[in-house]
Image (cartoon, helix red, strand yellow):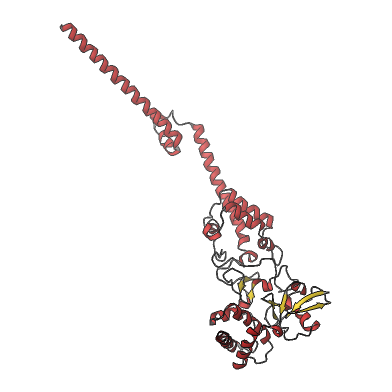
Amino acid sequence: MENKNSRRQNRLKLVIYITLSIGFVSAMAMSLKNKTVSKNEDGNLMATIAGDNSTNSVADPATNEKENNSETINKQREQESKEAFLAAYKVFMHPRCMNCHPKADVPLQGDDSHLHAQGVKRGVDGKGVYALKCKNCHQDENLKGDYLPPGSPGWHLPPANMKMVFEGKTPRQLAMQFKDPKATGFKNFKKDMLHHVEKEPLVLHSWTYRTPPPLSHAEFVAKVKEWIDKGAAIPDK
Amino acid sequence: MINLKINGKAYEVDADPSTPILWILRDHLGLTGTKFGCGAAQCGACTVHLNGDGIRSCISPVSRAAGKEIVTIEGLDPKLSKPLEQAWIQEDVPQCGYCQSGQIMAAAILLRDNANPTDSDIDDAMTGNICRCGTYQRIRKAIHVASDLRRKK
């Protein structure tokens, strides 16, 4: 009877040892699995893990190098995007462009961007007021002769509810404005922005009279495209 | 030959299409109410209406008027010209009078589009018409009078 009880106790101990062993092995396996998942999901956590001597074998030097390269490339693209915008900014702020994007409701004139003579005003639709409509003097073509009004079909300022002010804006402020759909009315930023600088007749017309902008139209469009393609980064200032 | 419609009347004019409308009016058709001031759209003395817009006839080639209607000071709608004329006389507006044709053509557009203009509206509408005699205060007052006359009728 005693031998029988003793055997039962030994069997019970064996079951307990086996159960504890299985539990311990399972816990270790789960721990390793969690570390591996974190490594894949979160690069920062991976770096923390890699710093732990007990798990050095998890960090993969090739992956680290790849991710560092990717970060460097991203930073380089962002910098190139900003530089492209700064090049295009010189065109945006040139009198041929900025004169029709004034901060007040009076357009600007000439290479010194003085207030437009005749005291003309924007009007609700950007086309002037009463007997001083833009098109009254700015006809469909440039007039030949000094001090005569340039012209193009559809000559106008941005309307009063969407003034698109360039005058006085820093590169950072101007880029932020371009990316604000409430300011531009663009439904598709990339498509509409490129269309405006590439196809808008008044934009194209800016290269046809008086002192032209500092880049050719093709160079200007390329810079705007590069700015957008590389992430439309906002300049620092 | 260029076919024109001026003050409701059809004209056939033998002129180069680049000839300014001003010289067609004055030299070809004898409509001398419209004046030459600066020749560069700066002063407003040559203002006429082209399909209702107050264009500067000194810089507008006659080709611009093809298929459209020109109205000069001689042909201004009496609904606008009469109250303006009466107000101009009442306020004794003109001094030398040279710019007044352009002033009245600009004022007519203002009153057509804004029956009861404020001082600010008048300034916005008339700022493009220069008067060397400086009759601006009387012009502003006369436009208020003309506005009242139109609304009373």
Image vertical order of residue B132 relative to residue A147, above or below: below
x 61%, y 50%: residue: A226
The answer to which of B66 and A56 lies nearer the viewer is B66
Name the spot of residue B2 as percent of width and height, x first. 81, 74
Name the spot of residue A87 as percent of width and height, x first. 61, 56
State the image quarter where residue A55 is shown.
top left
The answer to which of A116 and B33 lies nearer the viewer is B33
State the image quarter where residue A149 is shown.
bottom right
Figure label count? 0
**Residue B28 shows in this picture:** yes
Find the residue positioned furthest to the front.
B153
x 63%, y 82%: residue: B108
Position of B10 compared to B127: left or right? Answer: right
x 28%, y 20%: residue: A20
Name the spot of residue A3 as percent of width and height, x first. 18, 6
Image vertical order of residue A150 relative to residue A23, above or below: below
Name the spot of residue A182 as percent of width and height, x first. 52, 59
The quarter of the rendered structure image containing the N terminus of chain A is top left
